[in-house]
Amino acid sequence: MRDGVPAPCWWTAGGKAAWATDRMALYWGMMTVFSSERHGLSEDDSCTAAGAPQRAQRRILVIDHDEAARRLLCDHLGAFGFDVAAEDNGVAGLARLADDWDRARFHGLLVELRMPVLGGLAVLQEMNERFPTVPVIAMADAAHVAKLRQAVKLGAREYVIKPFDAELLRHKCLSVFVNDSGP
């Protein structure tokens, strides 16, 4: 910290570089955020990691009906350096994708497969028709592995089983949303 201002720095883990400030620490592969800023949902239902480099900023949309899961995903993705927005159902998520398409496109989508209003499989089918270039990571709990397989057949590039390991989530998101060159 210099003159009360956090000093930005780079750290590496597993060969991947990430942006951090002295408000964050890396211990045994776990990143801890020490900050009064909440890396959660703001009034406009989005979050961004403070100090993340612009070139690494990718807009990600999270669609999950479970508020606690949405907040946790947003916290993790924000800490990983993504600009995150969240919606609570498939209809709202697809509307958000369409509304933002011309001005600030999303670079990826994380979608829960089991939702009461337009589930994740229906969202994937719609994505194939309307937004085929946006990569998708499907999410579900271990009891719904068959739905995850179905999601991959429908075009999801990857899947995450809940409850998820933060490091595995980071690896999959970087692989699909940053390093992926397409289907």
Image: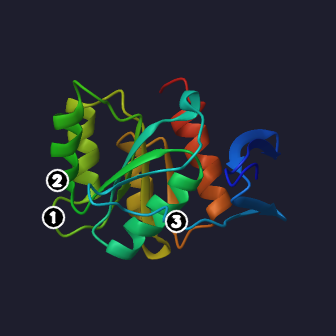
- Disc nearer the start of the sequence (1/3): 1
Which picture quadrant has residue 34?
bottom right
Whether label 1 touches label 2, CB < 8 Å: yes
Q: Amino acid at mark 3?
A: Ile
The local secondary structure at tag 1 comes to loop
Q: Which residue is mark 3?
A: 161
The local secondary structure at tag 3 comes to strand
Calculate the distance from the C-alpha at mark 1 to the C-alpha at mark 2. 9 Å
Whether label 1 touches label 3, CB < 8 Å: no
Which percent across, then down, holds residue 80? 59, 50
Q: Which residue is mark 2?
A: 92
Residue at the (18%, 70%) spot, across then down? 116
Along the line of sight, the residue nearer the viewer: 72 or 182: 72
Nearer to us: label 3 or label 2: 2
Residue at the (43%, 64%) spot, across then down? 40
- Disc nearer the start of the sequence (3/2): 2
Nearer to us: label 1 or label 2: 2
Which percent across, then down, holds residue 38? 48, 65
Which percent across, then down, holds residue 179? 60, 30
The local secondary structure at tag 2 comes to helix
Query: Disc number at residue 117?
Result: 1
Q: Residues within 10 Å of mark 2 (few under 14, many from 20)?
A: some
Q: Amino acid at mark 2?
A: Ala
Residue at the (23%, 39%) spot, across then down? 97
